[in-house]
Amino acid sequence: MTDAPWQGDACSLVEAFRSGERSPREEVEATLVAIEESDLNAFSFIDPDRALAAADTADVNLPFGGVPVGIKELDAVAGWPHTHASLLFKDHVATTTQDSVARLLERGGAVPVGMTTASEFGGLNVSVTKLNGVTHNPWRHGRTTGGSSAGSAAAVSGGLVTLCTAGDGGGSIRIPAGYTGLVGLKGTYGRISRGPNAPHRPGTEVCGALTRSVRDIARHYDVAAGTALTDPTSLPSHGRWEAELGTHELAGRKMGLCLDLGGVTLEPGVAETLRASAEQLAQVTGMELVEIEVPLPNLAAQWVMGNLSALIAELGDMWPKRAGELTDQVRLGLLLADSMYNLRVAGVAEELRVQAYQAMAEAFGKVDLVVAATNPGPAFKASSTVSAPDADKIERLLEAPGVHHVVRGLMGSMRLAKGIAPSLPNRTLDVATAKIPDIVTMGALTIISNLYGNPAVSIPGGLVDGLPVGLQVLAPHHQDGLLLDVALRAESEIGWTYPFLPA
């Protein structure tokens, strides 16, 4: 019997199956033991019977034949819990399987072992919920993996499985990848189907995976990408993502360095580390690194309001009756959206979004790629429910007795006031953005690619205080293959490692 799960990538595990070096059943058994013994809290649900049965019938000639994988708990798998990582849905069971998951299991031949933890409704880049507790970073227990694909990042970087599904609506693939030293690609919007039951609003979410190698991402694209009748925004796929790895000429291309994209303040040591990483990437690829400014409007507050208004509709009559079961941050956000969101806010959000489109178009008119930080700093405290420098103070404020009654009263007043002065919510959001930017602009380094819809990848960019920081590379729409080749060169010529491997 295999003592531990495979320490390489998913593609090499398939090769080991085909050569007879390992068997799918042995790998699943080792995986289940490792998950049981792990203190990462990466999985919220395990289905050993299904995993072992699938392993016994696995076709190793398929792209991921026999490979144990984790499914993000925000993704639907028929017959499995579909909790949205929230107490409100803790007893719900999915009746359908998400297109992207079905393709991974059916076309790819992967073996599903369980569901990985996520932040509640995927709304925060933290790794703690009331439903599942705290998920820990394999690089340092007690530090976050980010979110929303928290457990997926922990499971892959922590040596439990080689691949997990993930999703990115504001940075939820790239943020955890950056915090855990993984490669994480958010593809062009529509690259992988979000169906069935895929709402268009807010038009920012993409499906994907967290992996240990670039070729794993490319192979996942070959399996999962393409059009689907259930998702009219899905894009065609040529199906040659892995075969075309390494075919893009990089020498002579321009990389525009804008580490603090979106005006985000980086923590000490991050800019220096990532600048050195970008310079090294330019050197090994022959690309030209130039300084660039990308003057983006700050539309995070209006965008968040719109997203939360859609969530209110999904909760139906559970809101606000069961508000106390939500995490404090989601509950407060819903109170704000319920009270402040109106047509004026929606209109301003669209105006700002168009301005952001123009800023990104102008940037890509000057350079081939934009290089930025993935996160403001290395992983913060795992138990934090707010990703901000003053997280402890903010959490104490939110947890103070009666604070939500005060907020509810204020928001009730705002609801009345916006009927008299419709522009008041926008003015209030502008003040909030100026006064508490670290809260309002949560994930601001990554969100622009969700709004614009272009592909962006986070690759390991070095260590700060012994923890990984991600270097984010952005490309124009439909240049996913170019980004894969940039990441591939970084992987092959600079290299990266994982905390479960010997130093």
Image: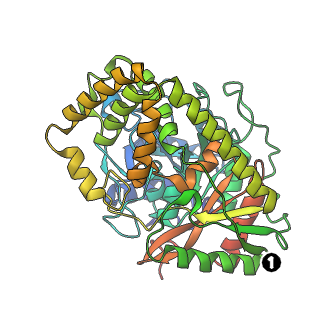
Q: Residue at x 48, y 27 (%)?
A: 310
Q: Residue furthest top?
A: 317
Q: Residue 499 location, x and y as percent? A: 45, 72
Which residue, given by chain and number where applicable, does mark 1 sit on?
Answer: 286
**Left or right: 342 with respect to 358?**
left
Determine the image quadrant of residue 377: bottom left
Q: The residue under label 1 is which amino acid type?
A: Gly
Residue 223 or residue 5, whichever sits in front: 223
Query: What residue do we see at 51% from left, 49% from top?
Result: 172
Which residue is nearer to you in this view: 292 or 322? 292
What is the secondary structure assignment of the residue under circle 1?
Answer: loop
Q: Nearest the camera: 70 or 17?
A: 70
Q: Is residue 479 above or below residue 340?
A: below
**Residue 187 on image: x %, y %:** 67, 48
Query: Can the viewer see residue 266 in this picture?
Result: yes
Question: On the picture, is 229 further left or further right than 386?
Answer: right
Q: Is residue 14 visible?
A: no
Specify few, some or many for label 1: CA neighbours under 10 Å numbering under 14, 14-19, or 20 or more: some
- Residue lying at 25% horizontally and 51% vertically, measured from the top left: 395
Compared to 347, does 38 lie above or below? below
Q: Residue at x 44, y 75 (%)?
A: 268
Q: Position of residue 20 (x, y in %)?
A: 63, 62
Q: How many marks?
A: 1
Residue 267: horizontal and vertical position, in percent? 44, 70
Report the front residue among 226 and 283: 283
